Amino acid sequence: MRRIETPPKNVAIFIATLLLILPVAIYGLWLYSFHIQIDNQVRLVDFLFWGALIAWAQFTEVKLPFAASFSHTYLFTLAATILFPPWVPPLLVFLFFFSQGINDPEYRWYKDLFNRLQTGTAAAASALAYWFIVQNMPVSVSGVDVSLAFAILVASTVSFVVNVSLVSVVVHLATKLPIKEIWFHNFGWVLASYLIMSPVVVLLARMYSSSPALLGNWGGWSVILFLIPLYYARFHWDEAVKMREAFDKTVDLVSNTIDARDSHTYLHSQRVAVTAVEMAKAYGLDAAKINTIEKGARIHDIGKIGIPDSVLFKPGMLTDIEYGEIKKHPVFGVELLQPASNYIRETFDIIKYHHERWDGRGYPEGLAGHEIPLFARIVSIADAYEAMTAGRPYQEAKTPERALAEIEDLAGVQFDPKLVKLFREVWEVSPNSWRDREVFIRLYSSKVPSLGSSSRYSSEPEAETSPESS
């Protein structure tokens, strides 16, 4: 028998607050509906039809980047806002918002309840915004009445803001992460989707309320017919996402395999990625750019697959000719991934330029200063720090404090001085999980498949930090 779990106390209080707010909001909107002019009154068939669409939307969600998802719930909710009195949409959402994971062992009843309350509250706020504008704020452009379009844009924005705010608060209560970070790093980029899809809302409402009906004798048939290609497009988008995920996992597997062949570079790419992401967040980059940096850092050394093992795993120092072979790996990496450029082109600058130096003495092109792309400059510092604290057969591993001091000594020589200052700030406030390599390996080794330790050692002067280390 499944054990009934309860949420943390502060989360429970927040959910209970919403449980009080939503019924009051619905009742208030019911009273408000007596004071506004509404062309359509909701019938039972209307209520059940739009409720069924909202329920269906939960089982046809569209996968998005950053492990997020997008359902058509808000489209149907806003269409119902146009069609019916303002109390109807939040009630529809609360009654018909079914979780598709109800049979999942990880299902939590309080999460399902929160989702209903959060989405219902957002629907109530957007319905109030829509009807207030329609009734009190006529808008025209060059003599053309655009009140409906303006009201839908405002209602979409309100729905987004309330939805994301409530989610951000509950995540903050559960994890103690800053609300600002939760908002901008996970949801800030979604607003455009809400606004772009707004015309679909108007189309759905017009198709349903058209008199005479566009198809048969009921507007619902037109809506259903419209949803068929929408669902078909969703199916193909879902397949495209799965294909991209499969590609990303394949590339990660290759990168992990390269790292795992050498005890000195075991989990190298993962640690570089974690460090680079912390720097990117502190720099203030948005979620999409942080995702690019993480992905690029994970595969920055994938070009090593084109380097002969006799060179890559030479136990001693490299000759000039052998080092010349090593210096080809950034270009090899880009060439290797070129056939998949549609999926991963945004990471090419990181792969190709992470060994460039601020003074122009790096490779492969000898770029200097701000000629080096920002993402590559960030990964370069993370790469060097990881290499210094991991050590090589010919160079003993440095302590985190010594590695930090050496990176600071090379500010303005090998590294962007402003980014070095940022790195120190991040290093001082970040948890020890990535600063200390041994701690990182203990935390992450169970998450990444390993080929086991190899008796061969990589001889690449990885992320060289001084002329002597080359």
Image: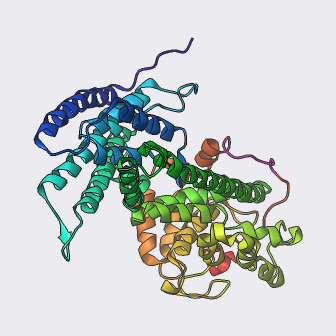
User: How far across and how far down the image is residue 261, in percent?
Assistant: 80, 56
Q: How many marks?
A: 0
The image quadrant where one finds the C terminus is: bottom right
Q: Which residues are magenta?
A: 447-453
Q: Is residue 328 left or right of residue 45?
A: right
| Residue 28 locus on image (x, y percent) | 16, 34
Q: Nearer the viewer, residue 160 or 15?
A: 160
**Residue 389 picture quarter:** bottom right
The picture quadrant where one finds residue 259 is: bottom right
The answer to whether any part of residue 399 appears in the image is no
Q: How is the image coloured?
A: rainbow
Judge left or right: residue 129 versus residue 70: left
- At 25% from the left edge and 45% from the top edge, which residue is drawn? 127
Give the residue drawn at x 74%, y 54%: 253
**Hey, which residue is sitting farthest top in the picture?**
1
Residues 14 and 193: in front is 193
Residue 92 is covered by the magenta coloring: no
Q: Is residue 110 above or below residue 160?
A: above
Indicate yes or no whether the magenta region holds residue 452.
Answer: yes
- 58 vs 311, left or right, is left
Looking at the image, which residue is at 65% across and 77% down? 352
